[in-house]
Image (cartoon, grey):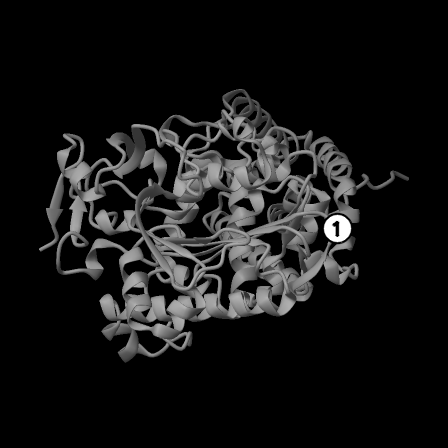
Amino acid sequence: MTSEPETQHPFFALRSHRFYNFAIVITGILIFMFVPLFILTPGQTKQYLNNGRELQVLGDMLILTLVFSAVLGAIYWLFCLIRLRDIGATLVMFVLSWVALSGFLFPLTTAGGMFELRNAATHWPNLIIVTVLSSILAVLSVSRYSKMVQVFMAIFLTISILPTLPRAFSQFEKVDGSANAVQLSADKNLVLVGFDGLPGHMVQDVLSATPSHRQTFKDFIFYENTASTSPATDASLLGIVYGNHDFTKWEEPAPIDWQTLYFNRDDKVNFTTSFKYNIYNKSGTRLAAGQYGKAEQRDELFELYRNVVVRITSNYGVNLMDGIDYIVFPNRQGKFQTTVSGFDRVLESLEVTSDKPSVFYTHFTFSHWPTVIDENCENRKMDKGWFREHQNIDGIHDGAVCGLNKYTEFIAKLKSLGVYDNTTIILLSDHGKPVQYYDTPPHNYKINNGPDMGFDRYQPFLMIKPAGRTADALEISDKHVLLDDLAQTTCNVFEPAGFCEQTPGLNILDDADIAPESFYIHVVKDETSNWMVVDHKAVKLPRGVPLVEAMQASPEIDLTERK
């Protein structure tokens, strides 16, 4: 009597659909769940995941996993239908191996996210290793060595995933309320609150026309000749943090170690940040976007996945991701921007509980273009008639009115807490509006024929109230200052002048401080340039000269009116 040959379990059989469907789902779970958990620190895990919207975060992750699995699964089944199943199986295993190896062991870039990920340098040795190993594993997976590949992948993934499980479970831990509070000091504070894209000239017009606002801000100095040195948010904030530099030459790691900046130095201050500034916060409190709204949560999750994509596909994948995002969701910047309710939530979280000086940096983008906020701070993006009629200076005006109203609420809150007098308050925008919002010069000037990043993008607003300052009326200063000067200005509130020289610029609050003779400004190269620094060139301009005149005199900048 002869025994029947032993048959392989169908799950591990080469021809098993179940195994490859399982591999497809596992790949999606790695990309959208376990690789993010692997690259996050415990503090970042709480910021991104344990933020009051845990079920929404988990739901979004599952939806993305299912969408990815459906796409890769459709490709696999297409190969099956045309009788090229081995090719489909090889592709599935190649993708799984690639994601596992680059996600956990050989990242294709070491960029940390402080600079534009679309320009992150590729780690070529790791790219070669991942390509070779993934190819070998994929080919072996459809050979007689398939079970060895499966065992290897199972062991590798188990070892890689196990350390992430505590972070996964921490997503549902109860967080102490102080984790999302802005803790101010009864003795000394500095708060820097930015609104996106509010032009200085429009804010000044609204102030001039509104006596109640002038009364609210009577202790402030409004700097009417403020210039930004970049037309886009990320690079503008780089200048606020690091001072004035040619950022086109910067690569990670930055020439200045962000961990040594005054707000991270020796834990001398209680440093709290939210949104865009979180990446500069070494050990202080990073406010979680999910505490403030669904839009903020999803925007932060999107930024998290950009870091995952650049890790497993290098900057090419991030460029593709951003391109798809722009085409499929052209209004995402209006859909997922930080909302007015987010500002209100931050206001509610202010409390006087810090036992040392406090610093708070935050930036809100509800005033970003396209203009969707009316003068009552109501979001009108779904009102097509209003939206169509306010993509102009009327919409900018409404945004400025809303912004000043919100700043008024902020001032009132500080006064109610008893910390207004001893707080240095900096209110600003990062840049102005695109060219198409204007019909008259100089605000409708294009730069080097760029369609969006024109002169007005360099016209932010800035007003400052130094701690202890009282006045009878709002002071209008014609001093020529840069947003980049805030790096040195804020540093000098807490540190001696010598320490602050690492962030070049001017101490705006020191009338005796002498400004450098020139500064770097970043402008588009031509009509094909976008908002990224890599697409810009740094031009040296003289300080103390009206910006429009300095630009007109530069041979590297061509100002022309939009027709």
Identify the image quadrant of residue 151: top right
**Residue 294 percent across, percent down from the top left:** 56, 67
The residue tagged 1 is: 355
Q: Is residue 441 left or right of residue 334?
A: left
Residue 354 appears anywhere in the view: yes
Q: Quadrant of the C terminus?
A: bottom left
Q: Which element carries disc 1, helix, strand or loop?
A: loop
Q: Is residue 397 above or below residue 76?
A: below
Q: Quadrant of the N terminus?
A: top right
Q: Is residue 347 above or below residue 131?
A: below
Q: Is residue 487 left or right of residue 204?
A: right
Question: Residue farthest to the top?
Answer: 125
Question: Residue farthest to the front?
Answer: 472
Task: Please tell me which residue is depicted at 14% across the width and 30% down the height of the picture.
Answer: 555
Q: Is residue 223 above or below residue 106?
A: below
**Residue 381 percent across, percent down from the top left:** 37, 73
Q: What crowding class fits label 1: few (fewer than 14 Cα within 10 Å), some (14-19), or many (20 or more)? A: few
Identify the image quadrant of residue 65: bottom right
**Residue 11 percent across, percent down from the top left:** 72, 48
Residue 381 appears anywhere in the view: no
